[in-house]
Amino acid sequence: MVLSRFLPKDEEFFGFFIDAAANAAEAASILARLLDASSPRSPDDLARDVAHLRALEHRGDEISHDVFRALHSTFVTPLDRDDIQHLTTALDDFIDRIDEAGTRFQLYRLGDPTDLAGRFSRIIVEQAAAIQAVVPLLEQVKKHPREIRDAVLTIHRLENEGDDLLNRALAGLYDGVTEVPQVIAGLRWGELYQLLEDVTDSGEDVADVIEGILITYA
């Protein structure tokens, strides 16, 4: 029937969100492996991981495109169209920044990861896990307000931890530095730390959209 293409597709949209959150969680785990100070990656392993990150980033773009195509062909949507667009964009930005951080680590040839970088990556993994856990609950917001609110608070707390970690990282960035190559390395590590903190900001952006959906539909 011609009208069938305009019927609501709740499962389709929520399925896209679940796929995007799982995709981001996988990317976060790869970033954590890249930045694990206890088990540095070889150049070949690093290249494979960064390529995998890029593939996941492309997959995120594909999911976003699928959402926007579905929006154009669906008359009645399970959430407000703006909410769908904002959540899709926020999830895509989250994985984009994860990919950017991993790529920059490889390009700058920074050597073995620092403990601080590893701590950033673990914060990002926790954010991604919280996002992956909460996104499926959006299909039945009224049944899960407490769980959704708790996940939002967790993501916000983790972003605050990222802010604090960035301040500590920058404060000690040039301790003991006396040579120009050390200064250059310090600049590059500082930029990477900022990129990692930007990832946590993007995770918080996802939480903000989810919180808005909770307020509207709970």
Image: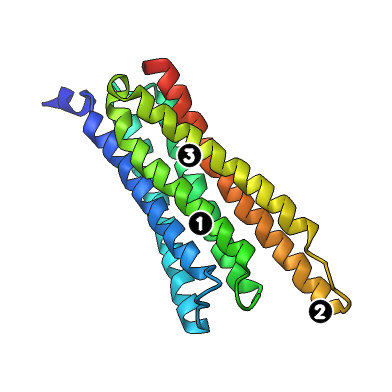
Q: Secondary structure at mark 2?
A: helix
Which quarter of the rendered picture does the N terminus lie within? top left
Marks 1 and 2 sit apart, C-alpha to C-alpha, by 28 Å
Three-letter amino acid code at disc 1?
Arg
Q: Earlier in the sequence, mark 1 or mark 2?
A: 1
The residue mark sitting in front, 2 or 3, is 2
Marks 1 and 3 sit apart, C-alpha to C-alpha, by 23 Å
Badge 2 is on which residue?
Answer: 181
Q: Nearer the viewer, residue 102 or 113?
A: 113
Residue 122's tag is 1
Count neighbours of disc 1 (C-alpha within 10 A) and say few if under 14, some if 14 to 19, many if 20 or more: many
Would residue 69 be visible to someone looking at this image?
no
The residue mark sitting in front, 1 or 2, is 1
Count neighbours of disc 3 (C-alpha within 10 A) and say few if under 14, some if 14 to 19, many if 20 or more: some
Residue 165 x/y as whole percent: 66, 52
Q: Secondary structure at mark 3?
A: helix
Marks 2 and 3 sit apart, C-alpha to C-alpha, by 39 Å
Q: Residue at x 30, y 19 (%)?
A: 142
